[in-house]
Amino acid sequence: MSARSFRVSIANTGEEYVCSEDDNLLKGMEQLSRKGIPVGCRGGGCGVCKIQIESGTYRSIKMSRSYVTREEEASGIVLACRVFPQSDITLSVLGKMVKKFELYALPAQRTSAVPAPAPAPALSTEAAAPAEDGQDAP
Ligand code: FES
C-alpha cells in the first residue's frame, strides 16, 4: 500500500506543497525545494521549525520540552520536523527565525508589534545649568 499525500499550506507566506504521511512537514517542504518553515537541526533539537497547526490532523513523535511545552503541544504548537500529516494541513510559522526577521525588518515591514528601543535618557537640568556663583562649573 502506498503512502497517502496531503496538501500543506503555510499561512505566513502563502506557500503550498504536497507532503507524504511518511515524511515530516519539514522534510516534505525541503524535498520539493519549498521555503517558509525555517530549517535547523531536522531532529527536534533546536526549536527553529516551531509551528502552529491551524487546521488538519497529524501524528507527532517525541519533541523536546525545551522548545514545546505540554500545553503548547495540546494547542497545536509543534516542531515541523517531528510532525507527519494525516490530512491537509494549514500552519503558521512561530520559530526563532521569524522573530529575528521581524526584529531586523524595517518598521513599515513589521507584521507584529516589536517594542521600540528605549529613548536616550534626558540630560540632567542641574548639570546643564550654570553654577549659582556665575562661574562655569569645572
Ligand atoms: S529543525 Fe531543529 S527542531 Fe526542527
Image (cartoon, grey):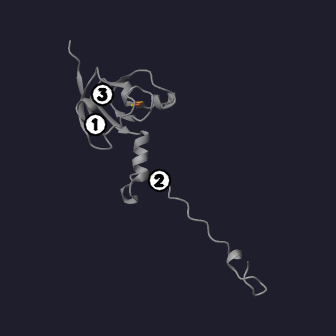
Residue located at (42% from left, 39% from top): 95
Q: Position of residue 70 (x, y in %)?
A: 50, 27
Q: Which quarter of the figure is the N terminus placed in?
A: top left
Residue at mark 3: 27
Label 1 with label 3: CB-CB less than 8 Å: no
Callout 2: few (<14), some (14-19), or many (20+) C-alpha neighbours within 10 Å? few
How dense is the environment of label 1, judged by Cα within 10 Å: few (below 14), some, or many (20 and up)? many
Q: Position of residue 48 (x, y in %)?
A: 41, 35
Is label 2 in a helix, a strand or a loop?
Answer: loop
- The Cα–Cα distance between marks 3 and 2, rounded to whole angstroms, is 31 Å
Please say if 102 is above or below 80.
Answer: below
Q: Nearer the viewer, mark 3 or mark 2?
A: 3
Give the mark nearer the N terminus: 2 vs 1.
1
Q: Amino acid at mark 1?
A: Ser
Q: Position of residue 42 (x, y in %)?
A: 37, 28
- Left or right: residue 35 versus residue 97 is left
Q: Is mark 1 within 8 Å of ligand 1?
A: no
Alpha carbon separation for disc pair 1 and 3: 14 Å
Q: Quadrant of ligand 1?
A: top left
Q: Is residue 108 above or below residue 32?
A: below
Q: Which residue is mark 2?
A: 114
What amino acid is found at the position of numbered circle 3 in the picture? Lys
The image quarter in which residue 128 lies: bottom right
Which residue is situated farthest in the right direction here? 133
The tag earlier along the polypeptide, 1 or 3, is 1
Please report the residue visible at 52 percent of the width from the left and 59 percent of the height from the top: 117
| Secondary structure state at the residue bearing disc 1 | strand
Indicate if the residue with disc 3 has its beta carbon within 8 Å of ligand 1. no
Q: Which residue is mark 1?
A: 9
